[in-house]
Amino acid sequence: MYRVAQSVVLLVGAYLLLSGRPLFGLFLLFSAFGYWFFDRYTNRVVKGSERKPREETSDFHDELFVADLHADVCLWRRDHINRNKRGHVDLPRLIEGNVSLQFVTVPTKLVLTRRLPRFFLTDLFFWSAMMSLQRIRTWFFVSARAELQLERVSCWIKNSQGSLKLIRNSNDLQSLSEDQSAGRQGIGIMLGLEGAHVLRGRFNVSWLVEQGFRVVGITHFNDNRFGDSAHGWRRSGLTSVGHDLVKDLDNNGIIIDLAHCSEQLISDVIDMYDEGDLTRPPILSHTGIKGVHNHRRNISDEQAIAVARAGGLIGVTFFRPALPHNSVKAVGEVVLYLIGILNEAGLEGVRHVAFGSDFDGAVKTVIDSSGWPKITEMLLESGISNKEIQLLMGENVRCFFAKHLP
Ligand SMILES: [Zn+2]
């Protein structure tokens, strides 16, 4: 259906262009091709990472529990069951990368710069929904966008014929680990929400629980009524409704994700944890660190230490500008730096570091989901012990969620 509609738009566009109405014609051609082009050219892997890992590395990697804390997989109109030329994640590539637990995160709104007014025309999700001919409600409503992505996730799981399993609680996670140690197939999928601005009316915390969300990021690119974003205008912290929301999420077994949050918001949530208002430590699902590369998207040493001290996890991400340069080695630099500063602060650093790729987040990454063995090889070459690599690649994430899921 989409292909037919796309072809009609394409033909009408070409007709208008040739019959002397170039503006309308170009607009329609842009609409027909723009989405494909955007997906194809933003969700790429950097060149130079084609080197295959050594056989010993692959053998070791195949024994690992590999976890990825953040990927926007179902944001895109694609076939996720078969291997795709576009994007970073699909079922065959998850299997090839020996991924055990993949977070599928749901973003719903993005006004790229704080200089622009915030309404539907400046929201990139409006344009991508329109150009990919998604149902009309998704052009304007963030809740409809979340619902559509949830439908894609459940279709993906259903069509995977048992290869993918939604993880809702610690029992699900336990049986996933048992299946994997027994050599049975199964990749766990966990749901995360990127930005709490979706929550309004019937889209409330109970709805999140019902849908199976287990991680919620308070903000994405824009400030919202719960608090402020690292990319926003206001740069304050949690609002009073935000404070209540964080408590409510925690009471319902949902972990708070501080990625994209303003400095003040991060410290507000940590304060809530320290004061005993939160029972579950927060995580930072996908980030870099300012000590290695000073960028607004990254966290400071103090923030990393505060999250780790609370018992949380820091997911090192795979794209620039979070990394100092575009290579697998840069991921290693961030991991080693993080472990170093956490150890210096008297913590066991290696127990608080994990990975959050940000695959399919309209970013160029150092690997795609088939490339996880390259991360293992880089860690081996950095002199990290096998035991520590097990923790970093996924054991930390497994233990954290086994402990904190309902
Ligand atoms: Zn993000």
Image (cartoon, grey):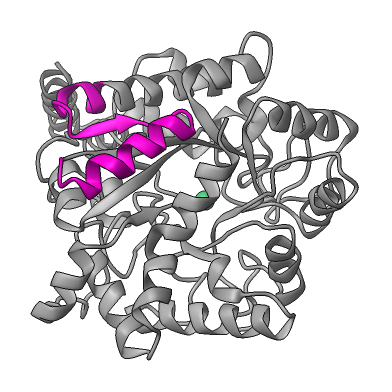
Q: In what quadrant of the picture does the C terminus appear?
A: top right
Give the image location of residue 382, x and y in percent. 37, 89
Whether residue 394 can be seen here: yes
- List x then y, in percent, for residue 333: 47, 84
- Residue 165 highlighted magenta (yes or no): yes
Q: Residue at x 66, y 36 (%)?
A: 118
**Residue 319 in view of the camera:** no
Question: Residue placed farthest to the top in the image?
Answer: 202
Above or below residue 140? Residue 324 is below
Query: Residue 142: horizontal and vertical position, in percent?
Result: 54, 24
Residue 75 part of the magenta-drawn span: no
Residue at position x 28%, y 47% from top?
39
Asked if residue 306 is positioned above or below residue 184 in the image, the reply reads: below
**From the viewer's perspective, is residue 281 above or below residue 16?**
below
Total of numbered circles in the picture?
Answer: 0
**Quarter placement of the N terminus:** top left
Please state if 223 lies on the left or on the right of 275 as rendered.
Answer: left
Identify the residue shown where x is 77% and y is 46%: 228
What segment carries the magenta color? Answer: 155-184
- Rendered residue at 15%/76% (across/down): 50
